[in-house]
Amino acid sequence: MRLYNLLTTQCDARHIDLNKKVWSPTPYILNAKTGSEATEEGLETWYNMRHWLINNFGKESYPIFDEVGHWHRGSATVDGWTWIGFSTVERRESFMQAFPGLTTLNTPERHSLDTHNPPRD
């Protein structure tokens, strides 16, 4: 739950409550190599991932609209990587097995949630 803890404790204080609401149903977050949606390859990768998620876990979770599901995609893609959260460790592991080489539990150190004190390269 490293990424969930990062989202709910180490980001700008103005965002903590919203992050908790959005991610608490799906706290087991990974980084997925979705690519850029501006490319055909990126669109195809996300299409395949999304359909796998829907077929295996149902509709996406949108807790800010009171729709709770078993998975949630982050709203930002940075350098081709997108956070996807899962309701259980087992669901996350299942997704990782379905997309080997396209997932990681880590986030690049240079991606910071603290906009006031960004890391130095």
Image: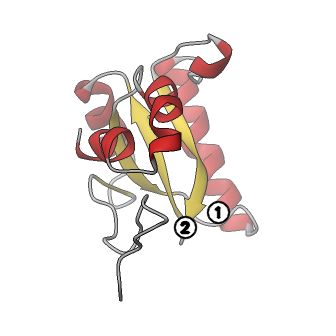
Residue 36 appears left or right of 74? right
Q: How many marks?
A: 2
Between marks 2 and 1, how big is the CA–CA gap? Answer: 8 Å
- Residue 46, given in percent of the width and then of the height, sits at 61, 50
- What residue is shown at x 34% (from left), y 69% (from top)? 108
Front one among 116 and 82? 116
- What residue is shown at x 74% (from left), y 66% (from top)? 40
Taking the image as drawn, is residue 59 in sight? no
Location of residue 44 (image quadrant): bottom right
Taking the image as drawn, is residue 97 in sight? yes
Give the amino acid at mark 1.
Answer: Gly
Mark 2 touching mark 1, by CB under 8 A? yes
Residue 112 appears left or right of 18? left
Q: Secondary structure at mark 1?
A: helix
- What residue is shown at x 47% (from left), y 20% (from top)? 57
Q: Determine whether 49 is above or below 106 in the image.
A: above
Q: Which residue is mark 1?
A: 42
- Residue 15, given in percent of the width and then of the height, sits at 51, 41
Give the amino acid at mark 2.
Answer: Gly
- What residue is shown at x 24% (from left), y 26% (from top)? 90
Which quarter shows the C terminus? bottom left
- Residue 24, given in percent of the width and then of the height, sits at 40, 23
Q: Which residue is mark 2?
A: 80
Residue 16 appears left or right of 78? left
Q: Earlier in the sequence, mark 2 or mark 1?
A: 1
Q: Secondary structure at mark 2?
A: loop
Q: Which residue lies most toward the bottom here?
A: 121
